[in-house]
Image (spheres, rainbow, N blue to C red):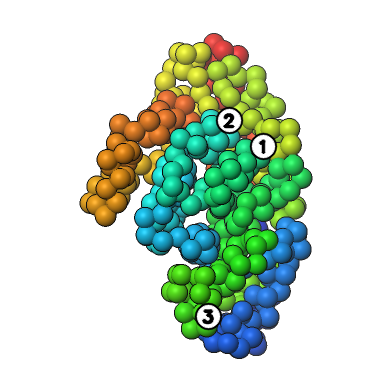
Amino acid sequence: MKKKFKEFNSFGIEEVNAAHKVVKTGVLSGFIANHEKEFYGGKYVKKLEEDFKKYFNCKYAISVNSWTSGLVCAVGALNIKPGDEIIVSPWTMSATATAIIAWGGIPIFSEIDLNNYCLDPKHLENKINKRTKAIMVTDIFGQSADYKNINTIAKKYKLKVISDTAQAIGSKQSKKYSGTLSDIGGFSLNRHKHIHCGEGGIVLTNDKNLANNVFKIRNHGEVINNDKKFRNLIGYNLRLNEIEAAIAIVQLKKLKKILNKKIKMAELLSKNLKKCKGLTVPNINGDYTNVYYSYPIKVNDKITKKSKKEIFNMLKNEGVPINDKYVNLLEYKLYQNKNLYNEYPWIYSKKKNLYSKKNKVYKQINFLNRKVHLDIAFCKYDFSENDINFISNAFYKVWKKLKLL
């Protein structure tokens, strides 16, 4: 069966008017890389940052031209130097790890928790040594990691925590917003997120020193830097323009409404799919919320008596917009190339196969992709109740064939 689902689009006349208003002024960027007030951007950039501070109850919100830039700023703000290690998830897109490499740091991949697909605190202490400076946590698929235990470990070893909350804007844990549960974190505003302005990102922190470092990295900080404690003297042009900022201001006002609908549709799907034996729907901890960037599903082939690949093909044939694989960064040749780390011999002498297919972290993610994981890209579509019922009925049809419904 074929069904065309409506693609998610959060834009309307409000964004058009906001962009037009900026264009009419002729001032498309308010930034200048000098000691003047323009070092911090134009009025729309500043308004956007104020709005994010208020919404997320955070002392500092700093806009950047992408969340990749935001991650680069976050790592640089910690004064990471060549050879420093940062623990990171392999179940995330490439920028999370390459932001570490950009400063000469070493990404140390660790296992994920199969209940939420985020870093598993139980495995972190095995990865910590005297070179470890931070833990970078990815809040994947729409909900946050176990920050209570991750922050406890970080405090024990005097490490900083970075949160990559690109996919989970607006989610909460213990009534606090994801992205504010770490020393420094933030969100993506690129085209396939819950809200967007084309490209962009927001860095959040309550730490004045980290915020000042991010301001410098964003806007050619070497021009004004006089902080002897800030070793990374190189800044970049990672600035958001006024048009994007004006659009993002409007988008932020729509966030709650967008999230409420995503959550409602996902909860309806979970209610329906719980009838399917051998299928595990997203597990939401009591004090967490999930904003469903994606809707992950686990298949138990011992119960279904069919492989994940066979289940995937059956669902696809029934018109379900389903995916069968997510990212395993350890598959990238970059991390299987020993020459990249020749300057840091301890990586291979003390941590054998850290970046090889024999590594247990690689094996965990590879097993997940090969045998278990499926997902529906909730952020790509504007699902209605009729759509959810169509998807649910497609699952029922497949599960009846499996004689499990």
For the residues labelled 1 and 3, the Cα–Cα distance comes to 50 Å
Q: Is residue 88 above or below residue 229?
A: above
Q: Is residue 3 above or below residue 72?
A: above
For the residues labelled 2 and 3, the Cα–Cα distance comes to 46 Å
Q: Amino acid at mark 2?
A: Asn
Q: Amino acid at mark 1?
A: Ala
Q: Residue at x 61, y 55 (%)?
A: 183
Is residue 12 visible to the viewer in this orientation of the structure? no
Pair 1/3: label in front: 3
Q: Amino acid at mark 3?
A: Asn
Looking at this view, is 290 or 38 the one in front?
Answer: 38
**Counting residues from the N terminus, which is met first, the one under dot 1 or under dot 3?**
3
Residue 291: % across, % down: 66, 44
Look at the numbered disc 1 and give the secondary structure of its residue.
helix
Q: Is residue 5 left or right of residue 334?
A: right
Look at the numbered disc 3 and give the secondary structure of its residue.
loop
Q: Which residue is mark 3?
A: 226
**Callout 1: few (<14), some (14-19), or many (20+) C-alpha neighbours within 10 Å?**
many
Q: Which residue is mark 2?
A: 115
Q: Residue at x 60, y 14 (%)?
A: 405
Label number found at residue 305: none
Residue 228: % across, % down: 51, 74
Looking at this view, is 296 or 362 the one in front?
Answer: 362
Q: Is residue 145 above or below residue 298?
A: below
Label number found at residue 266: 1
Is residue 161 visible to the viewer in this orientation of the structure? yes
Look at the numbered disc 2 and give the secondary structure of its residue.
loop
Q: Residue at x 60, y 57 (%)?
A: 184
